[in-house]
Amino acid sequence: MAKEIRIAIAGNPNSGKTTIFNNLTGARQKVGNWPGVTVEKKEGMTSYNGHAIRVVDLPGTYSLTAYSLEEIIARNYIIETQPDVVVDVIDASNLERNLYLATQLIDLGVKLVFALNMVDIARSRGLVTDHAKLSVLMGIPFVSTVGTRNLGTRDLLETIVRVAEDRESVSRHIHIDYGLELEEEIEKLQGLIRTHTSFPDKHHSRWMGIKLLENDEEVTKQIEKGPGKREVFDQLEKSKAHIHNIMGEESEALVADRRYGFIRGALKETFQQTRRDRRYLSDQVDMVLTNRLLGFPIFIFFIWAMFQLTFTLGQYPTDWIDAGVGLLGQFVGEVMGAGLLRDLIINGVISGVGGVVVFLPNIFILFFCIALFEDTGYMARAAFIMDKVMHTLGLHGKSFIPMIMGFGCNVPAIMATRVLESRRDRILTILINPLISCSARLPVYVLIAGALFGARAGNVIFSIYLIGVALAILMGQIFKRTLFRGEIAPFVLELPPYRMPTLKGTIIHMWDRGSIFIKRMGTVILVGSILIWALSSFPMAPNHSSDPGVEKQYAAQREEFQENTLLGRLGKAIGPVLRPLGFDWRESVALLTGFVAKEIVVSTFGVLYHVGENSGEESESLRSAIRSAMTPLIGYGFMVFVLVYTPCLATVAAIRRETGSWGWTGFSVGYSLTLAWILAFIIYRGGLILGLG
């Protein structure tokens, strides 16, 4: 086989970049993190005509300027790794904006292929691009693709191989002309950079000179580390002053103007709009979905429908899996001899992990719905709708994007606050983000709501999520007026066009999120279940016996025995704090173990109620046990407490990492725990006063 070809997939967010990556690699991909950070890294393999091709999906960016972590990662990978080919995925229906990133890639001097994606949408809007002529003008091959229908993938692979092997006749390196005055200053800086720094490559040195004129912080830091920095910075100051004196504008603005001038010039000869003054379907839909009066109620309806579907549709496979877990416990009980190992497997592993496994269908249905919202383009509309709501409360609309991500998991949502330019806005968003209910809490809601509220369970779960969003907005407003006073920086929220999602793409996105949950069951939840079993089993009762017949004789005393175990004593120790909320020692222990991971709350109940110990008609399911132990009032207060109280350890670690402060981390833990207690107290005591207990 020929030498491996390494390619990087770049592009704007919502350009279809990840769809192209999936088309190229299929199932042959792995997901990890970029070194030193938690931004997701996708890498895959494909082959074409005897060539092994390694594909890396770079973070979606609008430019290669050091404004965000994603931009820094993308450009550092290209500069340091030097892939054989960079494929820039361009939205054919929004060429001018998408080609801005292309101009910066041209400045880097790398081998390029442009995937002109979503040409079907462009044509439906009367947008026609002569991509063959554009290829000749720019010296870079353009390949038409429709990622959602896997069209053009073979042509793209063929072009990638030709460019990598220098066999593409169209390919030639061009320089974007920044005008006489800027070009003279770029050349001066380029010469000093090549002479005095560790970047002798002529293309990278030209790019660095341009970035210095753009006041790029990362490039400035790189120059500061090398020799000859004084000469470079002295020349930079002279160049900026000269450009401002001659042109009357800052160099940064002039560079951007020249780039857009290059783009407009290229499109003038190759692009035409055959139909004008036409209201597209996307615009017609937006007239309703983003309407000032209708947008918010429609958004709430979609979220309600999502949770109704999650609970009602998920109920059937959940019951099947629940029955399977019971049969597994029965089978193990019959084939294994009595003893501690049998007790561990049945009451520890099967009860603990099995108690969470049964809710996998609910988790995957939720992720499928979220993926559907994202793939259609509606998620961006949700951010736009909530932007208006949050601005009326003095909050930044852009902050709602990480909050939306929090429905999946709070950890990546907290990482996503890096896109916020202001540290004040980042910390504020981090503090309120854990109030958005993540998928790990969903099994707790499904268990308790299903046990206590019957047919109304879907509405009850929906109300919990609404409370989370309302609390996030309320606390954000309080923090903004007390801890984080100041003006809100403006930000434009993008509204990408609506698209018809593909089943394959939606399932891939669902699996990417759901597989993380499955991995947690094999690690955190399994270890937590075993630990909980051990703490709830020792010290053993003096009359404990491994003989099932003898155990049955003492079944009535089991609760007394459990209260004297290490876990029972711990639960009774913290009981006085939580007893005013209506919680007994079991609920107290479950909340305590939930500090590690919220799914472990369900595992704890499974172990404490020994739901895997017996099976058959006499077996008491976990929901039946919950129904016997809690009233609806206590159950609702418990769900609200789980929603609000201290986030899991992984989220706490993410807060510490992103804020860089133990103080803010401690404040986040403390205020959420206090708020949870107050709300649960109000619900329980208020309910008793109203006669709802």
Image: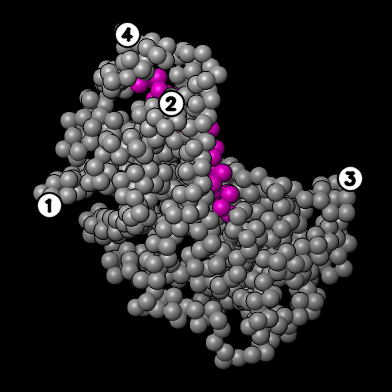
Q: Residue furthest front?
A: 617
The residue labelled by disc 3 is 1
Answer with mark 2 or mark 3, whichever residue precedes in sequence.
3
Q: Compared with residue 536, is residue 307 higher up or lower down, i.e. above or below?
A: below
Report whether 149 appears left or right of 595: right
State if disc 2 and disc 1 touch (CB < 8 Å): no
In the rendered structure, which amino acid carries the disc numbered 4?
Asn
- Which stretch did the figure color magenta? 509-536
Answer with mark 1 or mark 2, whichever residue precedes in sequence.
2
In the rendered structure, which amino acid carries the disc numbered 2?
Asn
Quadrant in the picture for residue 529: top left
The residue labelled by disc 1 is 690
Residue density around tag 1, few if under 14, some if 14–19, many if 20 or more, within 10 Å: few
In the rendered structure, which amino acid carries the disc numbered 3?
Met
Answer with mark 3 or mark 4, whichever residue precedes in sequence.
3
Identify the element where label 2 is drawn: loop
Real-space Cα separation, disc 3 to disc 4, in angstroms? 70 Å
Answer with mark 4 or mark 1, whichever residue precedes in sequence.
4
**Residue 614's disc number:** 2
Residue density around tag 2, few if under 14, some if 14–19, many if 20 or more, within 10 Å: some
Residue occupying the point 88% across, 47% down: 2
